Amino acid sequence: MPDSHPLHITVLTLFPEVFPGVLGASLPGKALKDGLWRLEALDIRSFATDKHATVDDTPYGGGAGMVMRADVIDAAIRGAEARFGAPSRKIYLSPRGRVLDQALVKELAAEPSLLLLCGRYEGVDQRVLDAQNMEEISLGDFVLAGGEVAAMALIEACVRLLPGVVGNAATMDEESFEAGLLEYPHYTRPAEWQGRAVPDVLLSGNHAQIKAWRKAQSEAITRQRRPDLWSSLQKMY
């Protein structure tokens, strides 16, 4: 049965037609259909007041590009709150924000409601971000054309953690970042493929040895590929 209070996510975007997109497929899509979470995508342009539905203007101080207007964004946020209630957290997807990691995903997935603002052009007038006390969250040190792809990534990461979405909860316990390590390699049939064999330990049936091998692989991969994670983990012990 669906939770009586499923996670409710409102997305403010200039392109509401792209939602749910990939979120409507596989496990997130099934969970959406089953009522384990809810999604509303609102068109920011519908909150503009002039006949051209203008949402942006040239930046004060000069410079390239356009900036999304504070009054239009504020109206969109207030309109969303009037329809769905005040969200527990309001987030602006921005490359200058806190980098999204699994710890933050867990925080967000535990909230009853989220409002995600997808910017475009050169960004959003700072005044509305301040007035609305928006959190800024980034996927990493790169720039996208807009916040929609980032919003989908954040939403999928959160939805996977909701009760009932992933059938075997133990699956998530061994995923990358859950223990501060990257995940170990996986293998399945056939036992040999193009001259490459599955490691013998995985065929041994010895669960203690398999567990130890997987832990050692996770540690080695983390040391090699993410020395920053490995260093942080060592400081914890």
Image (cartoon, rainbow, N blue to C red):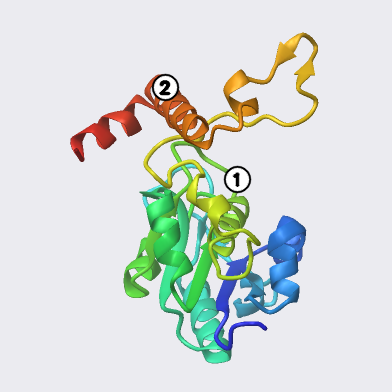
Relative to the observer, which residue lies in front, 79 or 213?
213
Report whether 181 appears left or right of 22.
Answer: left
Provide residue 171's location: percent of width, then percent of height. 57, 51
The amino acid at mark 2 is Ala
Q: Position of residue 74 (x, y in %)?
A: 47, 76
Residue of label 2: 220
Q: Which residue is mark 1?
A: 145
Q: Is residue 50 left or right of residue 82?
A: right
Which of the 4 quarters of the picture holds residue 189?
top right
Q: Secondary structure at mark 1?
A: loop
Question: In the depicted view, which residue is nearer to us: 87 or 216?
Answer: 216
- Element carrying mark 2: helix
Circle 2/circle 1 CB separation < 8 Å: no
Is residue 60 among the parts visible in the rendering?
A: no
**Badge 1 amino acid:** Ala
Q: Nearer the viewer, mark 2 or mark 1?
A: 2
Instruction: Locate the N terminus and report the quarter of the image it occupies.
Output: bottom right
Residue 213 visible to an observer of this rendering: yes
Q: Position of residue 29 (x, y in %)?
A: 74, 65
